[in-house]
Amino acid sequence: MTSEASPRSADKDDPVVVEEVSVGWSPEQVLLEHVSFKVHAAEIFSILGASGCGKSTLLRTVIGLMPPLDGSIRLHGLPVELDRAGPPIFGVTFQGGALFGSMTVVENVALPMREWARVPPDAADAMARAKLRLVGLEGAADKPPSELSGGMKKRAAIARALALEPSLLFLDEPSAGLDPITSAGLDELILTLKEVLGVTIVVVTHELRSVFATSDRCILLDKDAKGIVAEGTPRELDESEDPRVQAFFHRIGRAA
């Protein structure tokens, strides 16, 4: 178990390849340095770390919302900056869900289909309702987001992220603010997406219960180290003798 990416025969098999990436607001405000990892196809890969370690900033850099200070990022073999001209090759959800309050839930989900793929309104509506069925929200399709619970908003955001049939999905703190029962239901949905759709899922989180329930592999970021201090399965990290890994796993605990 090291901070090095697992070997593979060819990068083209790995939907996400991050090599020697440094992220931050400027060369004088660096959060993470020389981060390298690969995400394998059809796995659930978690990026872990305490608050302030830079994990959400790393996510924003990986999906092209922020330029890296150094290093390279490839999604499905293409440099991430080349994905800006056309429809995105991945889906993403952020912590707040980012649903438009002036639209119904189904209109939110249909929006990428209409804006990016130019799907006719009736077809987009039908496809959006199918996505909501997949995430268990068919009955909320015609409601405004304001009438949804926190967990339902997370599911609606995932449905919208799946609108363009991506094979790669990024989830930023999907369980944040949810009670344990709702969080467990979201974990089941994430597993279902992997099993039914074969989608590769990258999750940014500090929720260890969800990591043990869903993740195939994970990396742990450390604020003081400004980088990855461990990589492996959740069980391997849990059994690590590295004091930095122990501090995260056993101070926060699996119930965090």
Image: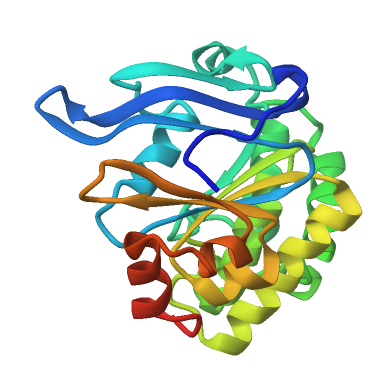
Rendered residue at 74%/47% (across/down): 43
Q: Is residue 107 visible to the viewer in this orientation of the structure?
A: no
- Image height of 236 relative to 152, above or below: above
x, y percent for residue 247: 33, 70
Q: Is residue 222 left or right of residue 43?
A: left
How many labels sit on residues?
0
- Which quadrant would residue 74 be assigned to in this image? top right
x, y percent for residue 6: 64, 35
Near-viewer residue (64 or 134): 64
Point out the residue furthest to the right here: 196
Point out the residue furthest to the front here: 241
Q: Is residue 41 left or right of residue 229?
A: right
Rendered residue at 32%/17% (across/down): 70
Rendered residue at 44%/59% (across/down): 95
- Which quadrant would residue 33 be assigned to in this image? top left
Q: Is residue 185 left or right of residue 227?
A: right
Q: Is residue 189 visible to the viewer in this orientation of the structure?
A: yes
x, y percent for residue 67: 35, 21
x, y percent for residue 5: 57, 33
In this picture the colour scheme is rainbow
Near-viewer residue (39 or 161): 39
The C terminus appears in which quarter of the rendering?
bottom left
- Image height of 25 relative to 182, above or below: above
Near-viewer residue (52 or 232): 232
Near-viewer residue (58 or 250): 250
Q: Is residue 70 left or right of residue 152?
A: left
- Image height of 234 relative to 178, above or below: above
